Amino acid sequence: MRGPADFSRLAAAGVRGLQPYVPGKPVAELEREFGVSDVLKLASNENPLGPPKESLEAIRVALRGVALYPDGSCYEIKRALAAKLAIPPECITLGNGSNEVLSLIAETFLGPGDEAVYSEFGFVVYALAVQATGATPRVAPANGEQDSQPLGHCLEAFSSLTNARTRLVFIANPNNPTGTWLEPAVLRGFIGSLPDHVLVVVDEAYREYMHPDSCPDTLDWLAECPNLILSRTFSKLYGLAGLRVGYAISHPEVAELLNRVRQPFNVNALAQVAAIAALDATDHVRRSQDLNRAGVAQLQAGLVGLGWSVPASAGNFVLADTGGPAAPWNEGLLQAGIIVRPVASYGLPRHLRITAGLPEQNERLLQALRILRERGVGA
Ligand SMILES: *Cc1c(COP(=O)(O)O)cnc(C)c1O
């Protein structure tokens, strides 16, 4: 009888070396495993205010239409985005979350023999998307812990790994899981320095949380930098992670190439109407931003009070250095019904990534950590 190892040998070369993406632990799973209820999830950078009411209303109306295929061209959502961002709709490619956008870009521009560059502590999906194509990943060492952007992107390292085989460079700004960001002029200079055969993906999943002074006008750069691809999402600030909508903004010819690989109905009908409605939910957006600013500050102050090191974050989460192994803290939190994100898989075994929640949720987390400390965790 043939063993399962045979199938592994049949898989494409790029797939053989892959480790599957490990998402934040779902609430229901923790309830099953630990027999707890009232679970608090601060693990996946979701919006604690939930979806905009405008989106919920749009979904209610659209529910009646789900027997029909969605608009495969995403005409209305492209039109709405184009109007809001003042760009031509031909520059936009919708994806099933920006995760799919990142995979589409990799599939379109990479094959065996090509190379792609991303940071040591960059978003893990870049590694998966690149390796699945059989291309060669080039991992740029990150900034040191003492840098003003600890563990953040070191663009000199990116440059030194770029060569004639490089096709793609992935930069998250702000980055997950580090929360670090790049100064606009520095990022613009780097993009301008890349040769014509390299496309650069700037992943702006947390863009809307940035301080206005450090938020780059990346849309303005597209005309001067035809090789720039922006990736954005409705999953974070817009509170629609469960519906899966993200998009790329690129040169129209790049969009046309991505469209060849894209599955015909990749964004479902409810997601399309919800995303369009979310673009008008200005009040929800402002409240989410304000809440986040306060939440990140609350987490920072509370965690520093525990003696942890918590660098500034431009996202809706912090990356906290517990000063020792993070696993006992994580275990204690799970027993208290609180899910955060251990990042040992990124090579950061002392750190926890924690999403900013509502004030009372942040306080519950901090209180649980204080109790764990009293019980000797981390001593
Ligand atoms: C959460 C996240 C995304 C968005 O994922 P979606 O597929 O759009 O839900 C993309 N990039 C980074 C860096 C992220 O953290």
Image (cartoon, rainbow, N blue to C red):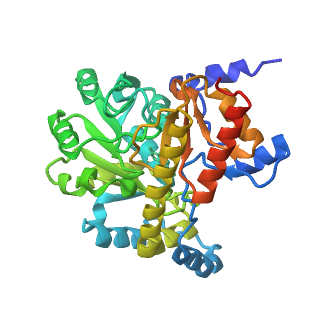
Question: Residue sitting at 35 percent across and 37 percent down?
Answer: 170
Question: Residue sitting at 19 percent across and 34 percent down?
Answer: 194
Q: Quadrant of residue 35?
A: top right
Badge count: 0
- When the figure is inspected, residue 154 is found, relative to residue 46, above or below; the finding is above
Percent x, y of residue 210: 35, 53
- When the figure is inspected, residue 96 is found, relative to residue 115, above or below; the finding is below
Percent x, y of residue 239: 53, 62
- Quadrant for the C terminus, please: top right
**With 134 as the anchor, is 17 left or right in this view?**
right
Out of 95 and 191, give the one closest to the viewer. Answer: 191
Out of 268 and 111, give the one closest to the viewer. Answer: 268
- Quadrant for the N terminus, please: top right
Q: Residue furthest right?
A: 35
Out of 202 and 24, give the one closest to the viewer. Answer: 24
Percent x, y of residue 74: 44, 67
- When the figure is inspected, residue 113 is found, relative to residue 271, above or below; the finding is above
**With 145 as the anchor, is 316 left or right in this view?**
right
Question: Residue sitting at 68 percent across and 24 percent down?
Answer: 7
Percent x, y of residue 208: 38, 58
Question: Residue sitting at 15 percent across and 34 percent down?
Answer: 193
Q: Is residue 132 visible?
A: yes
Q: Quadrant of residue 18?
A: top right
Q: Is residue 263 visible?
A: no
Out of 272 and 329, give the one closest to the viewer. Answer: 329
